[in-house]
Amino acid sequence: MNAPIAPLYEIVGQYRQLMDRLDELDLDEQTIKDTLEAESGDLEEKLKACVLRILMLDSEAKAIKAEIERMELRHKNTEKRAEWLRGYVLSAMRATNFALVKDARFEAKVAKKSEVVVIADGTKLPRKYQRVIPPVPLSREPDKNAIKDALRNGEHIKGCHLETNWKLVIK
């Protein structure tokens, strides 16, 4: 049974000490090279082991990254399917006037989300339904809050109407 190899930092320290001693002995280059080569066994084995560990860790990191990407895609697709099904159920409940579906495990109901202002393309709005966009004082955009208030108060604004958004609330 082989004795365990010392940690890399110890082997490097011993090897550096050997290099320093050989430098002090005033030996020729070939003798220094041969001596270092003869003493490099543990260092080379430890370096090989470390490089193999690096390769294993790199491979594991790539596998983990691939799994994360696969799971992120699965997560995104699952969310999309749930959102589509939520819309499908909401549409069916609204079309059949089912306001509530109850079960021992859940309660699903149709709820008003919000009213939004819809402006038809090319509609010319009166100035009172426009607001200035800073910093350019000549730029204007529809003031949807003013339009919403006016429409709620029964005013007619050509090319504009309110739409109610609905949502499915599941508890």
Image: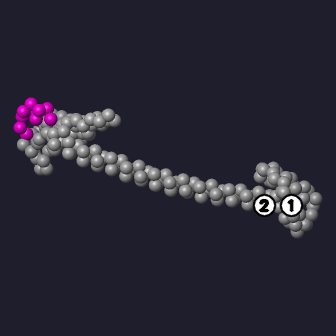
**Corner quadrant of residue 132:** top left
Kind of residue at badge 2: Glu
Cβ atoms under marks 1 and 2 closer than 8 Å: no
Q: Position of residue 76 (x, y in %)?
A: 38, 50
| Residue beneath disc 2 | 44
Alpha carbon separation for disc pair 1 and 2: 10 Å
Residue where numbered disc 1 is placed: 39
Q: Is residue 33 above or below residue 159?
A: below
Q: Is residue 67 left or right of residue 15?
A: left
Q: Is residue 43 above or below residue 143?
A: below
Q: Quadrant of the C terminus?
A: top left
Q: Which residues are magenta?
A: 148-157
149 drawn magenta = yes
Q: Could you tell me if residue 61 is visible in this image? A: yes
Which of marks 2 and 1 precedes in the sequence? 1
- Residue kind at label 1, given as amino acid type: Glu
Q: Is residue 153 left or right of residue 7?
A: left
Residue 39 at x, y = what percent?
86, 61
Q: Residue at x 6, y 33 (%)?
A: 154
Residue at the (80%, 58%) spot, across then down: 43
Indicate left or right for 53 with 86 as reference.
Answer: right
> Which residue is most to the front?
104
